[in-house]
Image (tube, rainbow, N blue to C red):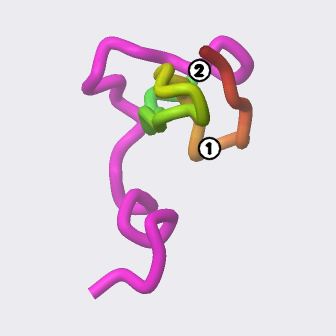
Amino acid sequence: MPTSILDAIEDLSDEDRSGIACPSCGSGKVAQVLGDNGGVSYVCTACGHIWS
């Protein structure tokens, strides 16, 4: 069992499964997160870039 979310997604391929790619590095390893005001943001688990 993975010890963290990063361990859980480490084995995923770079294929963009969600239709969302990181605008910084182009990776498809993107997680959707909820912001403080209820909005949706995205974080690239490959490079750490965060955007809305």
Q: Which of 34 and 43 is in front in this view?
A: 34
Relative to 48, is 18 above or below? above
Which residue matches tag 1? 46
Q: What residue type is labelled 1?
A: Ala
x and y percentages locating residue 42 in the rendered image? 54, 27
Q: Nearer the viewer, residue 47 or 39?
A: 39
Magenta range is 1-26
Q: Quadrant of residue 45?
A: top right
Badge number at residue 22: 2
Task: Using residue 4 as the reference point, say whether residue 49 is left or right of it.
Answer: right
Query: Considering the numbered disc 1 on the image, is that residue within a helix, a strand or a loop?
Result: loop
Q: Are marks 1 and 2 in contact (CB under 8 Å)?
A: yes
Q: Which of 29 and 4 is in front in this view?
A: 4
Residue 10 within the segment the image draws in magenta? yes
x and y percentages locating residue 19 in the rendered image? 32, 13
Badge number at residue 10: none
